[in-house]
Image (cartoon, coloured by chain):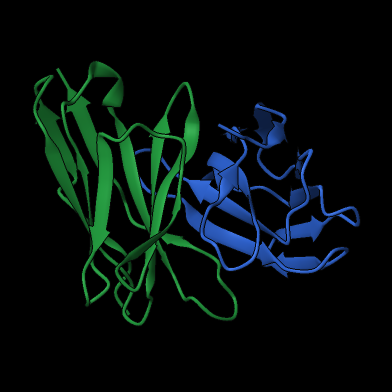
């Protein structure tokens, strides 16, 4: 099935460092979503973006909806141990709930 | 406000059997969608239900089916289970109008042996 290109696939960082990950698509999406998934749990919504160019923050997280509608990025500032997990981007069109997901970015933090 | 509830959390079935998974959406949410998550394929859309009608369907064989009840609760069924059906099955609910971001349940871990 269709997937978004998410990078990097994994990151190993020190606590306190900033993190950046991005997602690209060959198709346009009207909504971009970022989720975090812990082992054995379902994805938890972090940020939703609805307009091209939109920049939205949620605490230490900041995400942007690319101008072309074909990409998005997520930044995490001053990482802490509880940021460990897998981050997924997802694209959505209209009111349909057919989300297209990236492959995920696995974040590991060394204390 | 309770989140999306999926039951059971874990399930072990034998190849050839069938299985039914249940999902109760967030109160007030009318759209329910289902996803399959595997290490190899990632998160793949199965189908979406709204007002007891299937609105969208992913690229899965007919062995995968679902339904939605008048209270928005949903079930998905997989018949003639195959080893490759082992996966985490996730249900998500959302409002139909306005901001339509999806909120996921904890999932049902299905193991086919």
Q: Is residue A10 left or right of residue A68?
A: left
Q: Is residue A78 left or right of residue B72?
A: right
Quarter of the image where the C terminus of chain B is located: top left
How far across and down, in percent of the image, does residue B24 sit?
Answer: 24, 66
Please tell me how many numbered marks the rendered image carries. 0
As drawn, the chain in blue is: A
Query: For this rendering, which residue is in front, B48 or A12?
Result: B48
At a point 22% along the width and 33% down the height, the residue shown is B110
Q: Is residue B7 left or right of residue A55?
A: left
Query: For this rendering, which residue is in front, A103 or B51?
Result: B51
At a point 88% along the width and 63% down the height, the residue shown is A53
Say if B23 sits above or below B62 in the image. Answer: below
At a point 17% along the width and 39% down the height, the residue shown is B10
How far across and down, in percent of the image, does residue A98 sit?
Answer: 53, 53
How far across and down, in percent of the image, does residue A56 sit?
Answer: 76, 68
Residue B29 in sight in this render: yes
Colour seen for chain B: green
The image quarter in which residue B77 lies: top left
Quarter of the image where the N terminus of chain B is located: bottom left
The image quarter in which residue A108 lies: top right
Say if A22 sits above or below B106 in the image. Answer: above
How far across and down, in percent of the image, does residue B61 sit?
Answer: 34, 31
Query: For this rendering, which residue is in front, A47 or B33?
Result: B33
Residue A110 in sight in this render: no
Q: Is residue A86 left or right of residue A20?
A: left
At a point 22% along the width and 76% down the height, the residue shown is B70
């Amino acid at each position: 099935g269709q997937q978004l290109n998410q990078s990097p696939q994994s990151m190993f960082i020190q606590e306190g460092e900033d993190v950046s990950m991005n997602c690209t698509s060959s198709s346009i999406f009207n909504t971009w979503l970022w989720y975090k998934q812990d082992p054995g749990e379902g994805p938890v919504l972090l940020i939703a973006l609805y307009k091209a160019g939109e920049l939205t923050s949620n605490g230490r997280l900041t995400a942007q909806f690319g101008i072309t509608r074909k990409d998005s990025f997520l930044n995490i500032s001053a990482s802490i141990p509880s940021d460990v997990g897998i981050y997924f981007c997802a694209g959505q069109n209209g009111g349909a709930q057919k989300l297209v997901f990236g492959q995920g970015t696995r974040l590991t933090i060394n204390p | 406000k309770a989140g999306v509830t999926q039951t059971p959390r874990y399930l072990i079935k034998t190849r050839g059997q069938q299985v039914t998974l249940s999902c109760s959406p967030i109160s007030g949410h009318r759209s329910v969608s289902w996803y399959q998550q595997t290490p190899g394929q990632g998160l793949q859309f199965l189908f979406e239900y709204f007002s007891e009608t299937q609105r969208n369907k992913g690229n899965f064989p007919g062995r995968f089916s679902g339904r939605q009840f008048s209270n928005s609760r949903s079930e998905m069924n997989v018949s003639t289970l195959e080893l490759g059906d082992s996966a985490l099955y996730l249900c998500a609910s959302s409002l139909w109008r306005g901001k339509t971001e999806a909120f996921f349940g904890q999932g049902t871990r299905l193991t086919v042996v």
